[in-house]
Amino acid sequence: MTKGTTLEARLEAVGAALRSRPSLSDRVIEALGESSCQEPTPRRTTHPQSVRMPLRRRSAALAAGTVLMSAVCLFVLAALVPSQSFGWADVAAAVRSQRWIRATVDIDERTSTMWLSPERQIWAFDLGQSRYFYDGQERAKYEYNSGDQQITKVSLGEQDAEMVLPLGALSQDASALGPWLFGTEKIVHQRRQEIVDGGQQWVEFHLVLWRGDMNHATLRVDPKTRLPVYLLHYAPHDTAASYKWMFDYPDDGPTDIYALGVPPGTSIENRMPSELAVHVLDGMAASRALLGDYRLLVGRAPGYPYAVVARKGDRWRVDYCWPQGAVDPLATPPAGLDWGAWYEKRLHLCHQSPQYICNGETVWENANLLDTETAPKWKASEHVAPQDMNSGDGLGSLPAAPYVNLAGLLFPNLWPRSGWEFELEPNLTDASEGVLVKRSARLASAEPLVGHEWYYVDPEKGYAVVRAELFTLPPDAPADPTATRLRQTLRMEDFRQSPGGGWYCTVVRDTRVAENGARAPSEPQFGGEREADQHPDAARKFKTTVRYHFEFNAELPDSIFEIEGTPVGNQ
Amino acid sequence: METDAELVARVRSGEIEAFGTLSRRYEKTLLAAALARLRDIHAAEDAVQASLLIAFRQLGTLREDARFAPWLIQILRRQAVDAARVKVPASNREHDLDQQFVIEHDLGTWIEHEHLLALVARLSDRERLLIGLRYFDGHSMREIAAMSSRPLGTVTKQLSRAIARLRSWWDKEYLQ
């Protein structure tokens, strides 16, 4: 559409697109007709009961992959869960005394095997079609898929390193890392139980992972040896769907990827990043940890604060703000007030609802977030883990609280990953933009497309990203953000330093551009009229400006990181 | 045209089809609200469908039959929040850009729609409902007045105010 199009016409176009979708009411009536419970409930006099709806559909492939990755990481977890009766140190010591830990599972009539050697810093996994060998001492990982002509060798990323050195990482600060940070998986809730089975006493941990349909698990530990015996991984709503990992502790294990059954002579494609790249990526990870404790107001500009964040060590909370009454959501600060002071002044015009509270071990979610008239209803989050607040996952780590994880935006985890191309350009023409980290990957799209990400990193600001370009192009097109029809630019501005030396910015400008004649690679199913075709000169830009106001000396009493009342679910 | 209250009464007496009429009245208004929050058409449709089913099964909890629409929107909000929480985390995606968004939609139009829906979501419940009924569900002003048992003039004035507010935001924030 063009600038001349009326707002009413725009609304009509949105409506036309919505009305082109299939009728949901018909589906609902059909479902109600098939349901054995056709009658609506009678008029109530008591509080309504909650209704749990099924989770959104997911592809079988994703579910299977998630389950396997969860199990992979739980293998590491299995050796490390603390126990009240024999203590964290005892379990860790028992595991550390083993030369190798091996876990096997039968899935679809095929046995998969994993190994971990804390001493040799090796983690290996034979999944049948895929084989992985992580070498912590070499700081490299080798990956091989059946049918490939070669093995891929890439560097260990931040999370990979935790998989091969879980004991080392945990021994540094077990209480801070808690029982959930292992590899790429996260435990969001656990319950310990002592049981007697077969005349023998066991300790069992009932665990909830942060994602996946099969995100529940029971870990059985032998109290005599302090060693895990098995791990049963299951879906909470389908008890028939389960995997059982059995542990044993052999003297020997694989010392390279060929020992996992990769054909001898298979060549290795070396895709290890340069020393400079490792230096930059290490620097980003280090800077992410430097922000320290803070109170933070996050707001749109113009606008009002939409989130208040508090962080103290491994504890944090997010309060969501809702403007009340006649608040003009687009107002700007009057003369004499900066944005931070303006947001503070406007806080009292907003209703604040606690959204997340993390006590260091569990993230509690307020299920009553939108119901501002009733007290929060807390439940353990199955989708957000304690480390998500300052993770390197960028915008994706707290999807229900956009832009809140600023550390993730400034210092994303860009370590090379399988399936991604990685490149670093150290000498940019414009030296003010530091070095450029580029990565790209094929999109899971019907037509071939490549997603590109360019991060301009400033070494003088703790390797913070000062600009990011995210854009999509056909595979044969030269990578150039200015040439694409799909582009998002993030600019970070007004950098400052926390008392602890951590770098942060106070402004993030998020711009999305749809350039002349923009159209999707396939016919749009949602989009109405494509007036861009009729007005080829119409370029469109949409901007969001987010402002951050940090207080590093704010008083943060411990009580604000504890929920009030009794939580529901997962207990 | 029957009012919402009359239709609710019919549903209470066991007429499922009356619920179909009610849900068709508000379906696209709900879809727009869910889309503004979830930015994913399939997730939004799931949330709307779930909300309608919940509304039917919990109709007994509705205290004022004439307040069906705001009650339904409240249910939708909760569903949308839940849906947002179960969206696949970024680490499960191959790329941070929304692939489905790339595949299915005309990007430029989609961005405009998305921003417009975000602006509509800032309106008060009453104004948002009016905009939705008029433009998304495609009801005439006369129909909206009839279903909500309010004078036509009142509804028209409120809609005009909502449009003016949206236009002001749009011009100020999004036109470059």
Image (tube, rainbow, N blue to C red):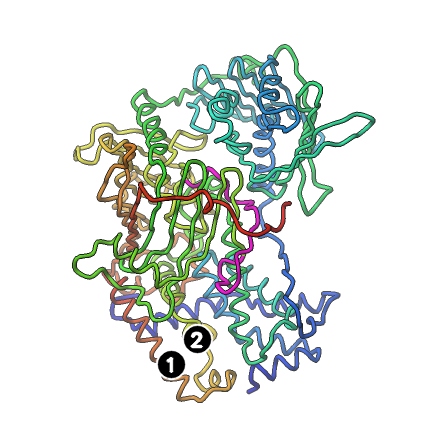
Chain of the residue that carries numbered disc 1 in the rendered image: B
Q: Position of residue A222 (x, y in %)?
A: 71, 23
Q: Is residue A94 left or right of residue A274?
A: right
Check the picture and name the quadrant holding the N terminus of chain B: bottom right
Q: Position of residue B93 (x, y in %)?
A: 47, 42
Residue appearing at x 64%, y 60% in the figure: A51
Chain of the residue that carries numbered disc 2 in the rendered image: B
Closer to the chain start, of discs 1 and 2, is 2
Mark 1 neighbour density, 10 Å: few (under 14) some (14–19) many (20 or more): some
Disc 2 secondary structure class: helix
Q: Are marks 1 and 2 in contact (CB under 8 Å)?
A: yes
Q: Is residue A55 left or right of residue A409?
A: right
A360 to A254, vertically: above or below: below
Say what amino acid the circle numbered 1 marks: Gln
Range drawn in magenta: A368-389
Which residue is disc 1 drawn over?
A: B158
Residue lying furthest right in this view?
A: A199
B108 to A18, vertically: above or below: above
State how far apart marks 1 and 2 are (Cα): 9 Å
Q: Main secondary structure of the magenta part?
A: loop
Q: Position of residue A447 (x, y in %)?
A: 44, 46
Q: Is residue A375 magenta?
A: yes
Q: Is residue B72 left or right of residue A11?
A: right
Q: Are marks 1 and 2 on the same chain?
A: yes
Q: Position of residue B85 (x, y in %)?
A: 51, 51
Quadrant housing residue A17: bottom left
Which residue is disc 2 drawn over?
A: B126
Say what amino acid the circle numbered 2 marks: Arg
Residue appearing at x 45%, y 83% in the figure: B140
Check the picture and name the quadrant holding the C terminus of chain B: bottom left
> Residue A31 — which label?
none
Q: Is residue B154 magenta?
A: no
